[in-house]
Image (spheres, rainbow, N blue to C red):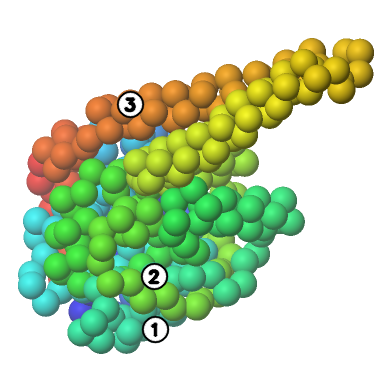
């Protein structure tokens, strides 16, 4: 079964070289590589690691660093333009945490005609306790404010129709997993273990992880706005009722000295804060919708050059703009 692998790479040639070798060992010439070099400066990715592994594919070099999610979006756009109607596509990270040996499990479930995308839901994670606690909180919070459950990342397999659908969605450049949820595609979850990095250390710190999580919420900005608005309206209404009750008790003489001013001040503050929260959410929704629309043409503008790789046994690879 032939398939294409889309993988983003940023200053991580050693790890992705090992990934290419592992893919070649497991799948031979049935796999094609689309590696997106996300503006690497110190060690830009060339075609040599792909060719030395005996694989064919391309290296899409970007003009600047655009971030992990948008790099994947550029790869999806490129594959959508070159894929056939029966082609299969796998999106995975290049650091080894997405285990190549588990790809057949994803592709096997993709054989169901009622499934468009098979995603890897993590069974076991090699992570710190702080990450696990944050991730558990994030999943519950995500479900609360969006009404959807997210338990997967970028590791997924999809058919040609799905890749073309995602290429038409600007949300992919914000958060790939949330975009898949918003795409209305039929999703199948596959429980897989997370692997260890091939080399080096992760470039994702806690701040970057938190930002990545909030970007996932931005894809469902309207849903978040409605739910926050409803919660704010309920809290605001309760604050008004509480303030009226405090005034009523004050007029009847049941309030102790200082109690009325403290209670009324707290209730007014709660009302103002809920109003400010609703306004901020509304403004962020408008900014996101007006400023983050990324079309296929804009994705092409990020591409500096496309290097074509051919297996070493069949000759040297070429280069095109």
User: Quarter-wise, where is residue 31 in the image?
Assistant: bottom left
The residue at 77%/16% (across/down) is 251
The residue at 38%/46% (across/down) is 223
Find the distance from the CA under tag 2 to the CA under tag 3: 30 Å
139 horizontally vs 128: left or right = left
> In this view of the protein, which residue sits in the foreground, 164 or 232?
232
Mark 2 packing: few (<14 Cα in 10 Å), some, or many (20+)? many
Q: Which residue is mark 1?
A: 105
Q: Which residue is mark 3?
A: 287
> In this view of the protein, which residue sits in the foreground, 145 or 168?
145
Secondary structure under tag 2 reads strand
User: Quarter-wise, where is residue 109 in the image?
Assistant: bottom left
Location of the N terminus (image quadrant): bottom left
Mark 1 packing: few (<14 Cα in 10 Å), some, or many (20+)? some
Q: Which residue is mark 2?
A: 119
Res. 277 in view: yes
Instruction: Check contact, mark 3 vs mark 1: CB within 8 A.
Output: no
Q: Which mark is residue 2?
A: none
Name above or below for residue 318 compared with residue 321: below
The residue at 38%/24% (across/down) is 283
Residue 320 position, x and y percent, is 10, 46
Instruction: Check contact, mark 2 vs mark 3: CB within 8 A.
Output: no
Find the distance from the CA under tag 2 to the CA under tag 1: 10 Å
- Which numbered disc, 2 or 3, marks the residue closer to the eye? 3
């Amino acid at each position: 079964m032939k398939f294409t692998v889309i993988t983003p790479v940023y200053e991580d040639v050693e790890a992705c070289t090992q990934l290419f070798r592992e893919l070649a060992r497991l799948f031979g010439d049935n796999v094609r590589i689309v590696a997106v070099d996300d503006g690497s400066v110190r060690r830009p990715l060339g075609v040599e690691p792909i060719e030395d592994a005996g694989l064919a594919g391309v290296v899409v070099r970007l003009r600047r660093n655009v971030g992990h999610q948008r790099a994947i979006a550029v790869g999806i756009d490129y594959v959508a333009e070159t894929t056939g109607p029966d082609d299969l596509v796998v999106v995975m990270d290049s650091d080894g945490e997405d285990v190549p040996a588990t790809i057949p499990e994803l592709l096997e479930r993709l054989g169901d005609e009622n499934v468009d995308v098979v995603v890897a839901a993590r069974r076991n994670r090699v992570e710190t306790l702080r990450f696990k606690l944050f991730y558990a909180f994030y999943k519950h919070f995500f479900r609360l404010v969006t009404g959807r459950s997210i338990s997967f990342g970028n590791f997924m397999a999809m058919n040609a129709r799905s890749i073309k659908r995602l290429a038409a969605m600007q949300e992919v450049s914000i958060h790939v997993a949330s975009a898949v949820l918003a795409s209305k595609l039929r999703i199948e979850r596959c429980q897989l273990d997370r692997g260890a990095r091939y080399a080096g250390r992760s470039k994702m710190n806690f701040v970057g992880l938190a930002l990545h999580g909030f970007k996932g919420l931005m894809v469902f900005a309207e849903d978040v706005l409605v739910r926050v608005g409803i919660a704010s309206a309920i809290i605001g209404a309760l604050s008004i009722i509480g303030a009226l009750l405090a005034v009523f008790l004050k007029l009847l003489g049941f309030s102790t000295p200082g109690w009325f001013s403290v209670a009324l001040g707290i209730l007014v503050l709660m009302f103002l804060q809920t109003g400010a929260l609703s306004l901020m959410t509304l403004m962020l929704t408008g900014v996101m919708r007006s400023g983050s629309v990324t079309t296929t043409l804009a994705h092409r503008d990020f591409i500096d050059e496309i290097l074509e790789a051919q297996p070493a046994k069949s000759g040297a690879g070429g280069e095109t703009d």
